[in-house]
Amino acid sequence: MSLFRYVTATKWTAKALLIAYATYACHHEIEKAVNTVEFYFSKSEPGYVRKEQALNLEIVHELNGKGNLETYVKNYSQRLPVYIRENGIIVGDSDYNISNLTEKERSLLVDIETKKANGYYDE
């Protein structure tokens, strides 16, 4: 009788471990499916990333050649580094961010830098 209990307990333990591993390994896909259902009837706010892209975003953690952690935001076609700056995080490098500014944002940035250079702008 004790052998039967041992086999039954081992079987249920193995099933539980298998389910836990499958959940861990498929976490992103499970989360994406849940979010797709949750936000099915929602629209993206203008200026924000499209819903299809938003639900496919991933945070990726990697160790570099020196053994230090690097963090990226990944979607279908891009993997952008996440940096820390004085006032918070920035996603992507400066060239990437400047290339994605609207003309109005670029104009505002130039105005601010011009005023700073002339001593008219206090932060």
Image (tube, rainbow, N blue to C red):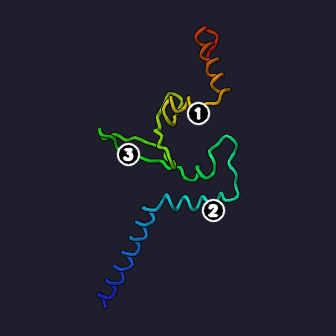
Rendered image quadrant of residue 65: top left
Q: Is residue 33 above or below residue 76?
A: below
Q: Is residue 108 above or below residue 65?
A: above
Dot 1 amino acid type: Asn
Query: Residue drawn at (55%, 58%), measured in percent from left and top?
Result: 32
Q: Earlier in the sequence, mark 1 or mark 3?
A: 3
- The disc label shown at residue 80, or none: none
What percent of the width, then of the height, locates residue 21? 40, 66
Dot 2 amino acid type: Val
Q: Which residue position is annotated with label 1?
A: 100
- The disc label shown at residue 62, or none: 3
In front: mark 2 or mark 1? 1
Q: Earlier in the sequence, mark 2 or mark 3?
A: 2
**Crowding near pointer 2: few (<14 within 10 Å), some, many (20+)?**
few
Q: Which residue position is annotated with label 2?
A: 37
Q: Indicate the quadrant containing the C terminus: top left, top right, bottom left or bottom right.
A: top right
Query: 39 or 106: which is nearer to us?
Result: 106
Q: Is residue 119 above or below residue 72?
A: above
Rendered image quadrant of residue 34: bottom right
Query: Residue drawn at (45%, 65%), measured in percent from left and top?
Result: 23
